[in-house]
Amino acid sequence: MPSQRNTRAGHYRPQPGGFDAFVAAPFPPSDLQIDDELLIDLGRADRALARLDGAASVLPAVDHFITMYVFQEATTSSQIEGTQATLIEALELGAEAEAGRERRDDAQEILNYVAALRLGLERLSELPVSLRLIKEIHAALMTDVRGGEPARTPGEIRKTQNWIGGTLPSNARFVPPPVEDMWQALDAWEKAIHDTDSVLPPLIHIGLLHAQFETIHPFLDGNGRVGRLLITYLLTERGILAKPLLYLSIFFRKHRNEYYSRLQATRDEGDWEGWLKFFVAGVYEVAKEATETVQRILSLRERDRIRLSTLGARSGNALQLHDMLFSKAVVNSRYVQGVLDISQPTADTLLATLESTGLLREWTGRRRDRSWIYTAYVDLFAATDTPREPGSSEN
């Protein structure tokens, strides 16, 4: 357990159970030092976000493509917390669930994350980022998932002490604020969200809000996933991105150990600046990669449309289905019949044709209830997709 010295972020207070819990200092820190290095990093990140926004603006029917970004984020953020499913498996599991087949636990968690992310983005049109919104998101995220008692309190702020790492607060890596102190910290955190007079650059403000949320840890479970969703909501609400195409879970997973150590350093050493440099570097890296992905999508779309235009009488239906594949990369005959308003034999023939051209791949191996995946498109998002390595999480 860290020593009980005070830091800019707070201090550790002995508790009756023989452990020390963290008590947050006033937030946000009033003595934040934004040096030249951080300013340079901020400029790079802001320019990368502007380029991403510009690239997204030329995507036809951009909302179709957001679905894949959402599934990628849901898979990656869930992997950080221990889910083993990859992006391709998540898409397949989602298709299985739509067909009414039994879901695996990790499929339920990923599909809940997708639902929670979408719910939050929809609610932003009528509700600002707030504790109320966060509770709604947590309810969607944690309903009907594994995890025992914590999973039975979806949408509820905790009423008991929680901890990170270890089996008890006494051997934990970090013990968040006790309930009474947690409520005080949450109040300050929510006021900081709505502080329209803040002179902090937007990315700095968002980075601070994410770190403080993780420190407060207001739920018994699901805090890490909710905290990462918070970043996307704030970027969208504040108009930094017109469309939600930036998700930092990929960066946090890639640098998992540093992610947790930087968060812990804000608590133990008051090192807000070290965390912010890490956070801003992540925004730059992910925005740059997302822009490159948009460019690859455009190239793939053009290439495949040229190929489909040579199919003669089938090209009309093939091109219509191709547009749909960018929002639903795994399809079955029933779906194709519905979106194109065609018969089952026509749908089956179209799918067989697209499979023979190499555009689609049948992945179930079944003779009935088969599904096809748009492999080249999924591969653009799955290039760095790997299940979580053993290690700790911040639940």
Image (cartoon, grey):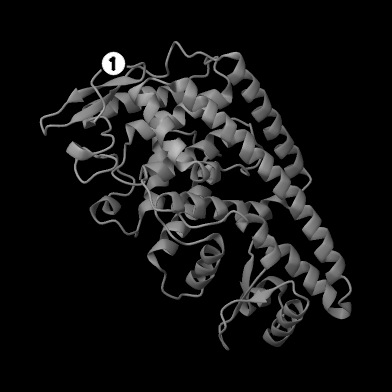
Front residue of this view, candidates 225 and 386: 386
Residue at coordinates 44% horizontally, 49% vertically from top-left? 80
Above or below residue 127? Residue 305 is below
Would you place residue 383 above or below residue 185 in this image?
Answer: below
- Above or below, comparing residue 145 to residue 45 in the picture: below
The quadrant of the image that shows the N terminus is top left
Viewer can see residue 169:
yes
Quarter the C terminus occupies: top left
Residue 190: image quadrant is top left
Numbered disc 1: secondary structure: loop
Residue 192: percent from left, percent from top: 44, 22
Q: Amino acid at mark 1?
A: Asn
Q: Which residue is mark 1?
A: 6
User: At which x and y percent is residue 38?
Assistant: 58, 20
Quadrant in which residue 71 is drawn: bottom right
Outermost residue, top side = 31
Front position in the image: 358 or 37? 37
Q: Nearer the viewer, residue 87 or 231?
A: 87
From this view, report whether residue 199 is shown above or below residue 60. above
Task: Look at the image and tell me whether residue 133 can be seen.
Answer: no
Residue 224 is situated, as x and y percent measured from the top left of the image, at: 40, 42
Task: State the residue at coordinates (78%, 76%).
Answer: 357
Horizontal and vertical percent position of residue 13: 20, 23
